[in-house]
């Protein structure tokens, strides 16, 4: 019996580091300048003890400052940050984090380990690794092709004729006649 092995990718394998943070009293013009300088879409807001307490995203800047015609110099990070701050552990599996993103309708999570902020993971990080994961899955499926003790019954994928003895050939189920034609 072939044992199926689960592909495990942890948050720590994909997360971005270091995390860019701002304190609660940073002005929004400072926050926006920092985001531009670092070419990032969000910053984590930390309190006086350096604990993460919120996040400011590009969307927050647009919706809470620009759209309301508020001067960025007059607004502090604490006033517009999104909270509560949802976090994930660096040891969590990537698939669970992706499900959590969808469920909570967020695009990024600060990554924690032993009470410390150690990284950030975004939907972009997950999308960047997805093609590699698909390749790994495809390779594993080629290593362990499906084997059947019983003959396969159904319509041939090439000619459409009914057969009680289909064979798997290059990912298609073929009847004996089509297999013979291919070998000529």
Image (cartoon, grey):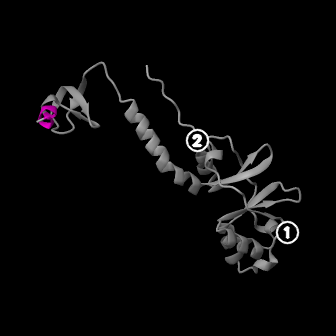
Q: Residues within 10 Å of mark 2 (few under 14, many from 20)?
A: some
**Is 20 placed left or right of 179 in the picture?**
right
Q: Residues within 10 Å of mark 1 (few under 14, many from 20)?
A: some
- Labels 1 and 2: the sequence-earlier one: 2
Residue occupying image coordinates x 76% and y 67%: 80
The quarter of the picture where residue 25 lies is: bottom right
**Is 130 placed left or right of 117 in the picture?**
left
Question: Is 142 placed above or below 153 here?
Answer: below
Residue 180: in magenta span: yes
**Is 49 placed left or right of 72 in the picture?**
right
Tag in front: 1 or 2: 2
Q: Given the current orientation, which residue lies at the most extreme right position?
A: 48
Residue 78: in magenta span: no
Which residue is labeled 1 in the image? 25
Which residue is labeled 2 in the image? 9
SS class of the residue under badge 1?
Answer: loop
Q: CA distance from mark 1 to mark 2?
A: 37 Å
Residue 33 screen position, x and y as percent: 72, 75
SS class of the residue under badge 2?
Answer: loop
The quarter of the picture where residue 175 lies is: top left
Q: Magenta part of the protein: which range?
A: 178-183
């Amino acid at each position: 019996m072939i044992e199926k092995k689960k592909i495990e990718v942890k948050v720590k394998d994909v997360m971005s580091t270091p995390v860019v943070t701002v304190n609660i009293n940073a002005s929004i013009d400072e926050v926006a300048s920092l985001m531009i300088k670092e070419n990032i879409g969000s910053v984590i807001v930390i309190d006086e003890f350096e604990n993460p307490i919120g996040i400011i995203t590009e969307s927050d800047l647009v919706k809470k400052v620009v759209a309301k015609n508020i001067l960025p110099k007059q607004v502090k990070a604490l006033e517009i940050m999104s909270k509560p701050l949802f976090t994930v552990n660096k040891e969590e599996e990537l698939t669970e984090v992706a499900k959590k993103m969808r469920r909570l309708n967020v695009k990024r999570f600060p990554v924690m380990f032993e009470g410390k902020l150690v990284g950030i993971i975004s939907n972009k990080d997950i999308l960047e690794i997805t093609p590699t994961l698909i390749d790994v899955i495809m390779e594993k499926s080629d290593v362990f092709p499906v084997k059947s003790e019983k003959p396969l019954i159904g319509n041939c994928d090439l000619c459409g004729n009914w057969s009680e003895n289909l064979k798997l050939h290059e990912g298609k189920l073929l009847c004996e006649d089509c297999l013979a034609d291919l070998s000529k």
